[in-house]
Image: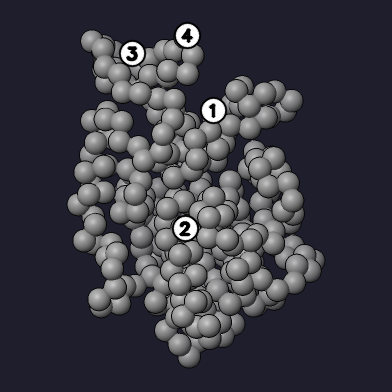
Amino acid sequence: MTYLSVCSGIESATAAWELLGFTPVGFAEIEPFPCELLKQKYPAVKNYGDITQYEKWNIGQFDILAGGTPCQSFSIAGKRGGTADERGALMYAYLGIVETYRPRWVIWENVPGVLSSNSGYDFTSFLAGLEECGYGWTYRVLDAQYFGVPQRRRRVFVIGHIDNRTDLAAKVLFEQQGVCGNIVAGSETQKEATAAIGKGVNYFRRGGNFKYHKDKKAATLRSSAASDCFDLVLAREKKYIRRLTPLECERLQGFPDDYTQIEWHGKPAEQCPDSLRYKAIGNSMAVPVMRWIGERIKRIEGEIK
C-alpha cells in the first residue's frame, strides 16, 4: 500500500509501516530539524513542505493519507484558540488534501482536547468535512501505554474510508466479538511496564547500550558504551532528579535507538543537540499505535480482496 504522510515530523508512520511493506509517496513537513532528519533517513522520498500548498503538489493516487495536524490550539494546556488559530485551521488544509486526492483510507490524530475545543464545534466540523468528501468515519481515544510503550499518552484517532456505505473504518479501531488482541484485556501488563519505569527499572523492549545501575544517590541508567560514562542525575536542594535521555524518549515513543541522532549543521551525529531531539520526539505519534492501525488496515484490505 502507498501513503502520503503530512505534518510528518520525524515520521512515526514510516517507522511503524516499513515492516508492513507500505511505501511512502511523499512527506510534508516544514520544521528545520525534522526536515533534515527526513532528508538524511529517507532521501528518496520527496518532502512537499507546507500542507496549505497541496493544490500544487500533483502527487497522483495513493492509498492512505496519514497525519496529525498541529495540536497546540486544541490542547487544554494552551490558550485553546481552536480553528481560529492558524495552526488549528490546518485541519481544513488536511481535508483539502482528502478532497483533492481521495485516498481510500484517512488517518488523522490529535490531542483529546480537540473533542471539546470551541464547545465541540471544531471536531464536529472536521468530521462533517469527511462526510462531505464522501467518507465513512469513526474515532477513538487510544492510549500508547496499552500498545507496548511505558508512557501514558492519550490521543484521538480518526479513521476514514472512502466507501461511506460500509463499516470498514470502524473495523480498524474497534474489536469485533471473538477477535483476539483485546486492548482492555492486555492493559494490566502495560500498566506494570509503566509503573516499572517510574521505579527506575530497565523495562525496555529494545536492546541498547544502557544497563541498570544503582548507587548511593539514586537508581539510574548508566551508559556502558564508553569508558567515561556518567550518571544521569541532577542534584537540586539535596534531592536527586534524573532527566530522561533522548534515547529513553525515543524508546518511550517506540522509535529505534538513536533514531533522532543525526548530523546537524555540519557537526557529527554524536553532537546533535538534545533540545532538538526532545522537541521532535515529543511532537511525534507513538510508533506502536501507528503500527497497530497499519496492521488492521492491511488485514481489512486483505479481506476485501
- The mark that comes first in sequence, 3 or 1, is 3
Q: Position of residue 200 (x, y in %)?
A: 27, 28
Q: Which residue is mark 3?
A: 235
Residue ranking furthest to the bottom: 165
Which disc number belongs to residue 228? 4
Q: Label 4: state its secondary structure.
A: loop
Q: Quadrant of residue 183?
A: bottom left
Q: Which residue is mark 1?
A: 274
- The mark that comes first in sequence, 1 or 4, is 4
Label 3 packing within 10 angstroms: few (<14), some (14-19), many (20+): few
Q: Is residue 162 above or below residue 90?
A: below
Name the amino acid type tagged 2. Answer: Met
Q: Position of residue 143 (x, y in %)?
A: 34, 55
Q: Is residue 240 above or below residue 248?
A: above
Label 2 packing within 10 angstroms: few (<14), some (14-19), many (20+): many
- The mark that comes first in sequence, 4 or 2, is 4
Q: Is residue 258 above or below residue 74?
A: above
Q: Label 1: state its secondary structure.
A: helix
Q: Whole-Å distance between the Cαs marked 4 and 3? A: 20 Å
Name the amino acid type tagged 3. Answer: Ala
